[in-house]
Image (cartoon, rainbow, N blue to C red):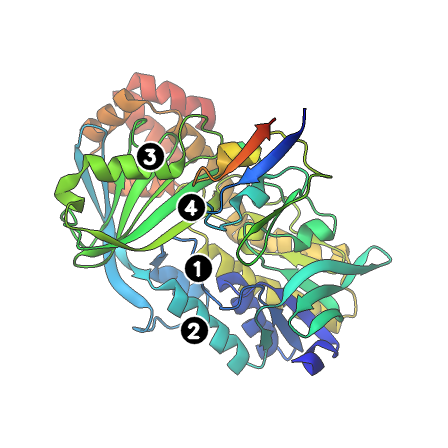
Amino acid sequence: MTKQVVIDKTKCMYCGGCTAVCPVNALELKETYIEWDPEKCIYCGACERFCPAGAIKVVKE
Amino acid sequence: MKKWLQEEYDVIVVGAGPAGSTVARECAKRGLKTLALEKRQEVGVPKRCGEGLGEGWCKIAGITPDPKWTRYEMHGATLWSPTGKKVVIPTPTKGWIIERRVFDKWLAEEAVRAGARMITKARVTGVIKEEDTVKGVIVETPDGVFEVMAKMVIAADGVDSKTAKYAGVNTVNPATEIDSGYQYEMVGLNIPEPKDMIHLYFGWDVAPRGYVWIFPKGEDHANVGIGIGGYVDEGTSKEYLDKFIQANPEIFKDAGIVETNAGGIPVGAPLKKPYANGLIIIGDAAHMVNPIHGGGIGTGMEAGILAAEIAEKAVKAKDVSENVLKEFAEKWYEKRGNQLLQVLKVRKFFEELNDNDLEKFADILDDKQLLLDFADGKRTAAFLKFLAKAPKIALKAAKHLA
């Protein structure tokens, strides 16, 4: 089972709020996208709960 | 701009929002060689803000209100209960809904005119540390990646701040300490009376653990936004805001959207230790935000003024250790931080009010100045006494405030 964090670019506002709640620094706000680091991510879902736009999801495949 | 990045500075400021530009301006005025780095290609864009600013902050921040950015004058707040009861609260002082893209750039211009050097599209990707002291930053620019050295660094890089984290300071906002915000700037609105006030709408169906706001920028023009608790499981901020707009056609039926914004609002406690060896952290990055209304422009600029004073002292004494920089935290807590901690208690109390409590509250509220003062962290005892009229609410208040 591979988990991943998927960001819907049609919804993402690039506000960087998810980077602010990420406890392990696995997200970064770049100019027009959010960069996700699978090496650091602990899949806690804080970003998904926080996201004002519903753009970020922790997906369990 | 390569040459600028090959020089050494007294102070590097990361971020050119209101806090960053203010501290850069004040450092430059104090004769410090200052470099401000902004990761975006344009200062002030996109805004992540409802754009409210009280006039008192301008004096504190050493700026004169300019019609270029004071878009619409405000004289109070109107609160709406879940069933539509209206509580109109005029304020003795005025404020504005400002134009952030103009305001931020104006502040940046003032910093440059004062002698600070500023570069946009310059992303800090790390700090340089020697002997546990921040000595500079690594910055990614169109001209390449540079290591820029400075006597000290001031992190003013906002809610998504990384600089402090690179330096080893934990600035993570726990989900209970951050609001999730979404906003449309709308035109063609039928804004409720009084039009010279901000309007706040409460209720669990409207905005769980938060509220919807209408901040007028003109007769028919406003920022319409929402902030809800960052740990609310059901629904996103956007969904709640859209629902509110659908449910209020008398305001929105002829409106259009000219801008969409989102953002995290740090509404928890400010950092206990907004400094490290060679580093001061200010503004949203240090969670220096009013936990009731989420405003951070004034507090950020105020912290910038103070940070410059301490930076000058440290640089001139050739000692940027925590020992010297801790004075920033001491003075800031005395000036603002302790008040914000009290406001945070008030917020925790307000968060617990259910819809019945909010209705009751709207019914019994007579002394509006008392509510204003209470929400500002003052006259707590008097407010608790007033709540004797509503024992259930008083019980909740006692839990957080007694």
Residue B347 percent coordinates (x, y): 42, 34
For the residues labelled 3 and 1, the Cα–Cα distance comes to 22 Å
Tag of residue B46: 1
Q: Amino acid at mark 1?
A: Pro
Q: Is residue B297 above or below residue B343?
A: below
Q: Quadrant of the C terminus of chain B?
A: top left
Instruction: Name the chain letter of the residue that bears numbered label 4.
Output: B
Q: Which residue is mark 3?
A: B240
The image's mark for residue B294 is 4
- Is B124 placed left or right of B236 in the picture? right
Q: CA distance from mark 3 to mark 4?
A: 18 Å
Of the numbered discs 3 and 4, the one sitting upstream in the chain is 3
Residue B237 image offset from top left, x and y in percent: 39, 37
Label 1: state its secondary structure. Answer: loop
- Tell me the chain of label 1: B
Please give the residue where the numbered disc 2 appears in the rendered image: B106
Alpha carbon separation for disc pair 2 and 1: 15 Å
